[in-house]
Image (cartoon, rainbow, N blue to C red):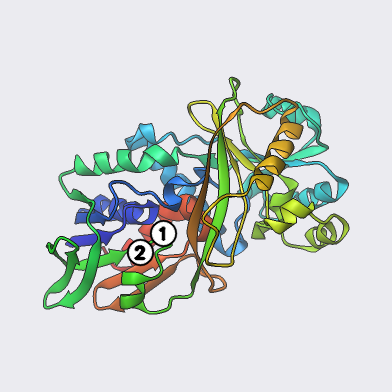
Amino acid sequence: MRVIIIGGGILGTSHAWAAVARGHDVVQIEREAEARGATVRNFGLVWVSGRAPFELAAAQRSRDLWEKISHQVPGIGFRPVGSLTMLRTDAEVAVAEAVAARPDAVERGFRLLEPAEVVKVNPALRGKFLAGLHCTRDGAVESRIALPLIREHLAGTGRHEFVAGREVRAIDAVSGGVKVTDDHGADYRGDIAIHCPGAAHGGLTREIAGELPVRRVRLQMMQTASLEEPLTTAIADGDSFRYYPAFAGEALDELNSRQPQSPVAADNRMQLLCVQRMHGGLTIGDTHEYVDPFAFDVSESPYDHLRSVAEELLGRSLPPIVRRWAGVYSQSTEPGELVCRREIADGIWVVTGPGGRGMTLGPVIGEQTADLLSL
């Protein structure tokens, strides 16, 4: 079977991986030279800990798929680093105690650690905190280099062709399969077309699929120079409890009522997430903005807040900030939907809207689509 994939981001590449792994030929078309959207504007976190119950099995499977991919493509930098959610108030500790006592705590790798235990797990955390919620199942990949290396591996199979710098203008069901036409007038014929547009909900996506149940979300992030010591886990702060569905419950309700976020964190819907890159620098974020159209520039106050929280937990000044950026991702608005996956004509599928879970869930979404299409 010949599969045409439109989109060079994490979803498009995950679909390409799944199709090639099952012995099919793939043409993957990307309008840029490389993916430049949410796929490279993220933490590279494979985040199992915060997933809702309905998506936990998928997240666990995807995490294992990332590890399996890393055996074939070691350069993607998969590390089973785990995470520590750092707790600075009694109300945050209460949320951690509640989730650590739930039936799925072992499956998620949850364990509540006293400060001395936190430091044994991650000696770089020498600041102020009451406890840490450890999750052993979280991991990290190098999102800015993973996809080119995966494509290089796929090309080596002889069953994958990557066509860069071509914007698809039409996707049509035709006799015997599908036809895809790019902005150079070239046609690509195949049996199935899978359109993975990321946050590009207009244009071609709207033309072929109409109004999908998705929204765009904007975030701000930054990266430091090398920390010059290992940060052995990813870290989060207690505000992350407010944004991940795994932590919902009475203890979180109590946290929200007793301990409002600081004004800048509340206004920007913020949490601290931090992961160390293989070059030693820290990727730090993030914010959430839901009202589109978004600003074209970035605001400095969220960065000041994130720096302050990170320095309080580390007990030291951060290295200089070397990069700041904003990103936009696509999020399904259908409750209980892992991703917006629709067949919009015979053999033509649109897959988008994983939310901020793209790097976590990409491999399993590709696998699920392959199963659904009997690839």
Crowding at mark 1 (Cα within 10 Å: few <14, some 14-19, many 20+) = many
Please give the label number shown on residue 365.
1
Q: Which residue appears at 38% of the width and 79% of the height? A: 210
Identity of the amino acid at label 1? Ile
- Measure how far apart labels 1 and 2 are at the Cα level: 6 Å
Residue 236 picture location, percent across and down: 67, 43
Q: Which residue appears at 16% of the width and 70% of the height? A: 179
Quadrant of the rendering where the C terminus is positioned: bottom left
Number of dots carrying numbers: 2
Drawn side of residue 160 relative to residue 121, left or right: left
Q: Is residue 111 above or below residue 122?
A: below
Q: Is residue 97 above or below residue 79?
A: below
Q: Say if residue 163 shows up in the picture.
A: yes
Q: Nearer the viewer, residue 18 or 105?
A: 18
Element marked by disc 1 = helix
Please give the label number shown on residue 102.
none
Quadrant of the rendering where the N terminus is positioned: bottom left
Drawn side of residue 243 relative to residue 13, left or right: right
Q: Which residue appears at 28% of the width and 55% of the height? A: 31
Q: Say if residue 24 shows up in the picture.
A: no
Q: Are marks 1 and 2 in contact (CB under 8 Å)?
A: yes
Residue 197 picture location, percent across and down: 36, 62
Please give the label number shown on residue 369.
2
To which quarter of the image does residue 345 belong? Answer: bottom left
Residue 65 picture location, percent across and down: 42, 47
Q: Which residue appears at 42% of the width and 54% of the height? A: 362
Q: Nearer the viewer, residue 358 or 337?
A: 358
Identity of the amino acid at label 2? Thr
Element marked by disc 2 = helix
Crowding at mark 2 (Cα within 10 Å: few <14, some 14-19, many 20+) = some
Residue 73 picture location, percent across and down: 33, 36
